[in-house]
Amino acid sequence: MIDFEPTNDQLAIQEMARKFAREVIRPAEVALDKMVDPDEASRSDIFRNTIKQAYKLGFHNMGISEQHGGLGLEPLTTALIWEELAVGGIGISATLLAGAVAPRFISIMAADRQELIDKYVRPYCEDTEGTNISAWGSSEGNIGSDGSNYYDPDVHHETTATKIKDGWVINGVKSSFVSNGSIANLFLIFACVEPSRGICGSGVFLVPLDKGVNRGKAMDKIGMRALNQGEVAFDEVKIPEDHMLMPPGDNYPVIHNAIKTVGNLGVGYLALGLMRAAYEEALQHSKERVQFGKPIIQHQAVAFKLFECFQAIEAARGLLWKASWVLGRQFMGDLKMSAAARVFATNMAMKYTVEMVQILGGYGISKEYTIEKYMRDAKLLQIMDATNQIMTIKGANLL
């Protein structure tokens, strides 16, 4: 039987996430959004203290197995948490999502390499200061959507990994779209090993912050300004041989799409939480704002917009829960379901944050209210971690 009732444990951790999101993340996001210099935001006490508190509550290691020091929460439980965190703000939430990618990848793909687990995963899971944070880099100046062009031998990453006697040498530049790029101390890097095989000639490498790793300035964006995104350059960076986590070959598309499956769920939950935040603010305003002698929610033009947004929230959550349920029961999940959930949720977030701004009228475009921030944030979700167009193509190819 289908059951939508969370367990008592799930309700407890959901409530903790809700409280943290509204009391800590939301005011931090508002303050960080107003900072003109995005690098200043990343260095600020507001940002660092928020991340530190999130780490202390364990929001950074929820999906990592208990065996390796994480909380080992299953996908439907983390789903409840990510939605609540995103209601508070999607920049900080995305920071936490991206920050866990490298440790989680190691935990799954190198589960039997105890040295790597002890060096990178356990310290991350045990961190209560927010000092260990990772980033993953695939996109480059000429490799954006082409990162999914698996079968054209002329398309390959320009970042290279060259074999040497006792390891690898990494050279190249990852684009400014690397989430946490300017603040991370551990990188999961996609680099070309066999250019004749195109994108499938890439391997996945673990690169710690060390000599030759240069982190660029944070990108100045219209939205999600609490999420640091910046270029990362590698100049003759030497790493040990066991830091190749996945070799090039025919399995590359499988692993790449598995990352997309999980990543798209994360983006979808960010969209869901963001849509809820905009809806809740507009709903409250509509009950207090009086025009033509009555609260504007009593005018059908307003009530219909709110009800349509409510429908979109419930429908998006249903799709996301289904994709999370599949992920919990099927290794690597279902890319088609994940893509469908992500594309729908992000498109609805874009549409209805605009509509919620409309409900506030002139107040909706004022910086004194957070609703205009939600609209700016929403646009990035249709683009990040592969555009909606690319994910639609991927999903359609799996029908």
Image: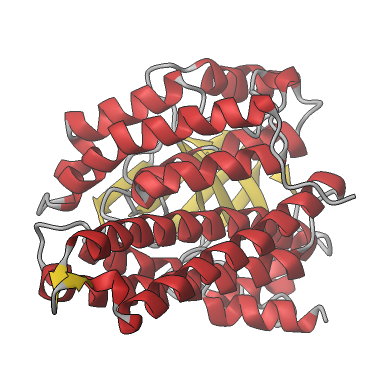
Q: Is residue 233 left or right of residue 251?
A: left
Q: Quadrant of residue 367?
A: bottom left
> Above or below — where is 310 with respect to 50?
below
Tell me if residue 20 comes above or below residue 5 in the rendering.
above
Taking the spot 69% from the left edge, 54% from the top edge, the residue there is 321
* Rendering coords of residue 25 (x, y %): 31, 38
Q: Quadrant of residue 275?
A: bottom left
Classify the position of the C terminus by image quarter.
bottom right
- Residue 296, compared with residue 62, is above or below; it is below
Q: What residue appears at the point 28 percent right and 56 percent down from the top-left corner?
A: 284
Residue at image location 72% in from the left, 62% down from the top = 257
Residue 158 point in image, percent of width and height = 52, 66
Would you say 289 lies left or right of 110 here?
left
Where residue 216 appears, as percent x and y from the top left, is: 28, 51
User: Toward the viewer: 371 or 54?
Assistant: 371
The image position of residue 346, as x and y in percent, is: 49, 69
The image's colouring method is secondary structure
